[in-house]
Amino acid sequence: MSPPFDLAIVGAGPAGMAAAMTAAELGLSVAVLDEQPEPGGQIYRGVERLAATRPNHLAWLGPDYAAGLELARSFRKAKVEYLDGAKVWQIEGTSAGRLFYKRHSAAGILTAQKFLIAPGAMERPMPVPGWTLPGVMTCGAAQTVLKAHGLVPQGRFVLAGCGPLLLLLATQLVRAGIKPAAILETEINRWTALPRLPGFLAAPGYLGKGLGLLRELKAASIAVHKGVTHLAIKGDTQAREIEYTCGGATRTEPVDLVLLHQGVVPNGNLAWSMRLAHEWDDAQRSYRPVLDAWGRSSNPAVLVAGDAGGIIGAKGAEAMGRVAAFAAATDAGKISAGDAGERANAARAEFAKHRGARPFLDALYRPQQQWVAPPDADTMVCRCEEVRAGEIRRLVTDQLCPGPNQMKSFVRCGMGPCQGRLCGLTTVEIIAECRGLPVKDIGYYRIRSPIKPITVGDLATLDVPRRDDAVGL
Amino acid sequence: MPDFDAIVVGGGLVGAAVAYGLARRGKKAVVLDEGDIAHRASRGNFGLVWVQSKGFGVPEYQRWTRRSSEDWVAFSAELQQETGIYSGHERPGGVTICLTEAEFAKRSERMAQLHLEAGNTGFDYEMLDHAALKKRILAIGPTVTGASFTPYDGHANPLTTLRALHAALLKRGSVYVPHARVEHINAAPNQFSITRNGVTYAAPRLVLGAGLGNNPLGKLVGLNVPVHPSRGQIIVTERVQPVLPMPTLMIRQTVEGTLMIGESREDAGFDDTTSPEILHTLADRAVKTFPFLRDTRIVRTWAALRVMAPDGLPIYEQSREYPGAFVCTCHSGVTLAAAHALHYAGYVIDGALPPELARFSTRRFDVQAAA
Amino acid sequence: MFKLLPDNAATTVTVMVNGKTVSVPQGFTAAAAMLLQGNGATRTSALSGEGRAPYCMMGVCFECLMDINGEPNQQGCLVTVTEGMRINAQHGKRMVAE
């Protein structure tokens, strides 16, 4: 095995790329592993290829996306070992610990003194009746295929839910000449958000962008139904219609495609699998790893940056990546703590600016109870193992099931291939609701490696010592 | 003060089985359990109802295990009738697969010994060579040497079994109290009380079924329960079409279609993390046994802590200092679940353990200490 | 359910989607190639048999499991197409060769 890297970074989104470049500049040997074939993460997904093959799409995807191109190009030039297409399935969270990955069908192991994990965000699961039907996807999925492949919805489609990503996607599609039949905007919290407006206004650019999106949608005469309180998607073998309640009236619209969105949350399975300490972020209605101001986690060998450490957005993630790189360089003895404090000032100020805008956005789009703990007993919670909301409620109320891990073992929610990514938050929200306790008292699933699929054969051929003393007849 | 016929400490497979056993005899038990995170061996169990590896040199253990394996059929049916929940129990027989001639020779010797020790109880087994095994399990690999087979073996789903036990004991009027880790016990002969979260539970009987927790808890009621953790690691795969008609000692296909690969044995204290070395060795053995596993995707791996006595046998005892206080502990909570529900609970009510369980008394540790 | 925007200078790759030959731009994923073919299910659940289709397109939901070049249960959204790739719907539990 090659000598340990000073820093191994998981994720080549804004946080991972920025951290890698800064750490390399500070003299650390750096490896970056990312699942995708190109750098950019989900936010800048496919930006290099797009610039090469569909450059005119950059104009309507907008400057925030185009900004990723420069970052990706700088990253390519940095003195880092970049492993594209690498699926990291386990990290031993110790200094000089091993990181296990699979790349182009081959197993790989590397060691590092320090690990920085930046796996980004994923969309919050939005379990509504019929959300498992073909013809129902997330807004993020539609945006991904738009950016990565130049694919746009065909037929009659609606966007349902709320959040900045939903509005951005709608606008990008409109600019591309593709109009949604309607936007079904679930209730947002103007009044609780209002007191947090000053921080949002102080962060330059946010207000203008938000109002701009709304203006463009209005100019395009997109029907926006506000204050939606109930959604159900119906169909036999695929989505055919969507039922929604708005202003006390329930209506139905025919659809070919429904795009759901209820904000984004940290993509947490890697952090959970390493047993990092987590805390409940009530404003963002999700768990996040406990981090200090430099991105240091509860494990001294592990740093977390970007949305995986709490939703902050691309620019904030990039700043936090730089900050965490200074921490890694300090811990490695490359620079003094005082020096780091000074040199990280600009990045820390940039991060603080984006952090300042969050409370308003978090409050405005904090999901209502019905979207995180589906009231209808038949709504699927665990898509993999087909566990419905009613069954989870029944186990808590009738059998006093004490928490998500016992629930998982009783009804198999979270035991399927997605390893709880699409049902974890819903399950703990339902348990909390049934028990009348805050979610922070409920806990979360224990996430087990491998967090990316490997085969039994991959393990059988893994280049590690045997332990025949503990296995066999 | 809520009054019960028995307090059962521990809501895993052992505690829940005894509590259900009490409830099915019309007794009201209260089960005091920990919360969501606990060293819950029941949750990490491999799920065999296994006879053919139990009791070399200890025929009492072989008989007790065999009895439970036979009782499992009725036990599973009863649970399903009570709760509508299928335990996943099947008893198609089972095999221990050998990968080398040396393993096969050692296995043959052991099976012969078990047969001898069974006396006139009888012990049917077969040593199957590669060709004979291939007729029963088509999926074996070319380098498999052979296997031992007994018809007594089977498997169950430990998770649905536990769920069914909880549902059944509640249905029969017993009480389950989670988030009630027990640290103090007020004990007098046939008079016990435990206060948790402001509620005092009192009963003339106390059953310690708290796994590794029995070690410190036993001391509170004059019971020496020297159990220690033995770590086992397990790999579970995606669902595949039915391919294994019977369980093997190390690999079984669940009713859901997933394949479980286990199980290692190591002393790692209370560390319940997995290690790549152990998983690698397990996986290597698994693909040699069943080559189709090479391309099968892993969904999860985990480690769990077995509850192990120094000699690997169960511990069944009533306190001499505080009669009415019993301990019930073993590393085969699934295999022995039927015996614990259908028999052990009755002994607790009777206030005496029968002579056939004398071999599992804590007195054996006194002898060891004296030697 | 999805269509390709014009102005795409990428070279194309020919793949077989459920037995049908289709051309897609280089860099496409197997799941994207499926989406181009219509609204239907791209797999059936291993439990109930109900139809499912790609949902997140970023590797977290595992709904886009498909059979790629004869290898079942692949995450289609994480597999980049190659010339001649065979992409097929996944029906229920995977089969294993005994």
Image: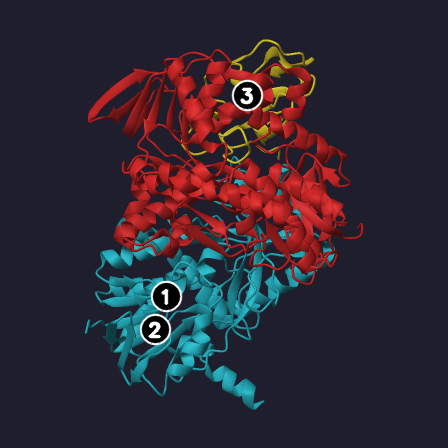
Chain colours: A red, B cyan, C yellow
Q: Which residue is mark 2?
A: B207
Residue flagged by tag 1: what amino acid is it? Answer: Gly
Distance, label 2 to label 1, CA atoms, is 8 Å
**Nearer to us: label 1 or label 3:** 3
Marks 2, 3 in one chain = no
Q: Looking at the image, is mark 2 or mark 1 earlier in the sequence?
A: 1
Distance, label 1 to label 3, CA atoms, is 60 Å
Contact (Cβ within 8 Å) of mark 1 with mark 3: no
Contact (Cβ within 8 Å) of mark 2 with mark 3: no
Q: Is residue B313 visible?
A: yes
Q: Which residue is mark 1?
A: B15
Q: Nearer the viewer, residue A271 or B35?
A: A271
Marks 2, 1 in one chain = yes
Q: Nearer the viewer, residue B263 or A178?
A: A178
Marks 1, 3 in one chain = no
* Left or right: A92, with A360 as reference point: right
Residue in view at x 67 percent, y 54 percent? A340
In the structure shown, which secondary structural element does the residue marked by tag 3 occupy? helix
Place of residue A19 in the rendered image (x, y in percent of width and height, measured from the top left): 66, 44
Q: Quadrant of residue A33?
A: top right
Split into 4 quadrants, where in the image is the C terminus of chain A? bottom right
Place of residue A185 in the rendered image (x, y in percent of width and height, measured from the top left): 34, 27
Q: Quadrant of residue B24?
A: bottom left
Place of residue A159 in the rendered image (x, y in percent of width and height, measured from the top left): 39, 23
Contact (Cβ within 8 Å) of mark 2 with mark 1: yes
When the figure is inspected, residue A175 is found, relative to residue B2, above or below; the finding is: above
**Chain label for disc 2:** B
- Residue A61's tag is 3
Q: Nearer the viewer, residue A458 or A232?
A: A232
**Chain label for disc 3:** A
* Left or right: B260, with A3 as reference point: left
